[in-house]
Image (cartoon, grey):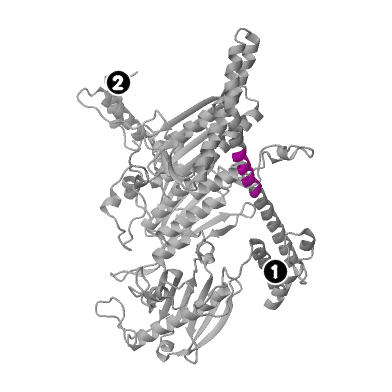
Amino acid sequence: MRNEQDLREQLEFLLNKDNKTVDYGMILDLASKLSEYDEKNVRFSVDGNLVKRLGEQLVAKKTTALSELIKNAYDAEAENVDVIFDNTESPGGTIIIKDDGNGMTKEALIKGFMTISTSDKEENPVSNRYERPRAGRKGIGRFSAQKIGEKLRIITRTDSSKPFLVIDIDWSAYKAKSNLLVVANSIIESDDDFGFEKGTQLVISGTRESWRENNLSTTFKYISSVIKVMPKTLDSGIVDPGFNVIFYSRIALSGEILPIKSDETELWSEADAVINAYINDEGKVSVSIKGIKINSIEENYELPEVKSSSLQQAKFKLNAHYFSLARGTKRSHVQTYLRDNGGIRLYRNGFSVAPYGSRSNDWLGLDDSSRRRLILGPHANTNFIGSVEIVDTEGTRFEETSSREGLIENECFEELQHSLYEVIRSAVNIITSARGRKVTSSQQNYIAPEKTLEEKIQINLAKIQTSLAGITQTAVEEFVDENLDLFDDKKIENTAVVPLNTDAQIIINEQIELVKELADEKNMYRILASSGLAIAEFTHEIQLYLNGLMLNGKQLKRYVKSNERALRSASEIDSNINMLVSYTDFFTETIRSNSQRTKNVLELRDVFNMFFNAMNPTIKRRAYKVDLTFEGDDFWVKPMHISELSSILMNLFTNACKAIARSGQPKGMLKIAIISTDTDHIIRFEDNGDGIPKENWGRVFNALFTTDLSQGPFATEREQMRGMGLGLTITNDIISEVDGEISIVEASSGYRTCVQVVLPKANDNEVPEDVY
């Protein structure tokens, strides 16, 4: 080890060298080591592993990590963000995030992105040009990139006349027992063509986890509900063009990049219908309704009671997406977006006129009409996303007020309000009728349709078939009447009663096979639910005998205590009875809790300890080594059924046991770590079994995908039911229901598989006050 004098001499030598050849990393390293000889002062040192630790603490879910990087593009005043997923179905792929925002200067990169815990967003809570409230969390972006992939390339510039700045970061360099200050990342200026004028492109390579369809939807829907904004004109006169995000996927064979998530697929596709209206040559309002989710709607008509020359001269146009948001739907991202952005905005000469259509502004009286139930179809402001356009360059008909807050409410403005309300009223009535609902409270002879799920699927199939064949709605109804049972194999063969071309017939046959598969899956879930009830009853009955068996076992041990061989057998019997007691106590407790049908906040330490106490006889019998650790102080999880959490643990435990058995490991090991972060709990469940190939990391959560071998054609039904590949699917559903996340991630040294579960942390007001 070098002494203080050696360090001084080497540091002095480096400082006196030519700046072009100086090693700044070594200077920092020597200065840090030299400071240890300061007898009067002590300093904090920073281990390189801090980057990984902060990544785990601040960004528990990969979907959150990606959302934070997209938020940074919003903060950079981007109008468009393209997110490209390249070979991310399994680990090792690439995610590219490209925005057309302000870009970063070298100073901004060094003092902003490369500085941990900056105060920029506290000092500048809104962006400079578009006055957008900052959406990104302080300093979380760089750790989000580390969470997603092994390497990061940043390509950015602020103006097309300047060269690009390119930074390459290898996160593996930030490892334990290294000095964070001396880990260098190359930065260069480049005149290469990266395909954009200004903005920032993040290339995250070596993705650590697989990205499944539900991960992409979760991220996109979250971004849409949190920061999606409509174009608007600021007080300064500057127009914020809005914020548009599109997810793309690269096709492996052709290399073509295709859009997979956008407003069109994730938001507008959830609308019941789109309504368009304009003033025709006769001065009448012409309306068209095109169904989206209700694809049977296609109406074109005029409103004879509405005629306006002023609106005709103003080139009146309406475009609005209508969302009925029927009770019971789970389109929470749509509801959140509509709550914040719902309404019909007014654009005059291409610019948005405040406050019309903004939140809490009821300029068309839609909220008032909805409350008074003048018509029964939902038609509040939050049922629409739309815009009405008028042109009045001279300002003679639609004149702004002196304060530039809205328009003068003259006769032309009142005609606009009246015409819009009549268009909406008529359109909503037509859509409501198509949905099979009452239009008005006084509607006579209305019979609410009652259809089973199978009937709904059957009718939809018929509509697809007849639509492809160009048959009328009457033919659809006749076709449905003739085909009574969709799931009867003989009648399925006869469903093609309408002559179709070959391509159409192939589509129909594929659809029928998918429906049959859905029916099989539904039946499987029904069997599993029935099995759960049977287990509950069995557990209750067996407990009646266990107390007697325990007493008999203790008596037997006393009677044969002088016979060593008999005593050994009696002890084994007693041990097996204790194992049964442990299992039945566990199942009885979880089933009893679930029977209350209420969700409660759960303390993970209590649940995990209870579970592994119940599994202890099995663990001992198999001689497994179990390492259970908790990192943090607060382990309360969002309200859920204890049986749901127990089901998750049981599935992970049994899968691990089967993996260890398949591997032939003489010493099975389980490692369970529960890490509490600011917002989530991370559960890492690891085993040293046979592992899961990386190409299957995303597939294991698909229904009926299993790594278990078939039991053979002559196996019993009980044997065939084992390993059906539904365990992780059900587990994934439970976790998704509480806004959590499950994935396969890289295992620790000495282990082969790691299943990572992220569960949201309970809020302070959800935790009982008297728990401590």
Element type where label 2 sits in the image:
helix
Q: Nearer the viewer, residue 66 or 607?
A: 607
Residue drawn at x 54%, y 57% as measured from the top left: 248
Quarter residue 468 falls in: bottom right
Q: Amino acid at mark 1?
A: Ala
The disc at residue 6 is: 2
Q: Residue flagged by tag 2: what amino acid is it?
A: Asp
- Please say if 548 is above or below 436: above
Mark closer to the observer (2, 1): 1
Would you place residue 180 above or below residue 594 in this image? above
Q: Of all residues shown, which one is farthest toward the top?
A: 562
Q: Is residue 480 left or right of residue 610?
A: right
Q: Residue 655's x, y, as percent? A: 60, 35
Q: Considering the image in quadrants, where does the C terminus appear? A: top left
Q: Which residue is mark 1?
A: 462
Part of the protein shown in magenta? 526-537
Question: Is 531 included in the stretch rendered in magenta?
Answer: yes
Left/right placement of residue 505 relative to residue 372 reads right
Q: Earlier in the sequence, mark 2 or mark 1?
A: 2
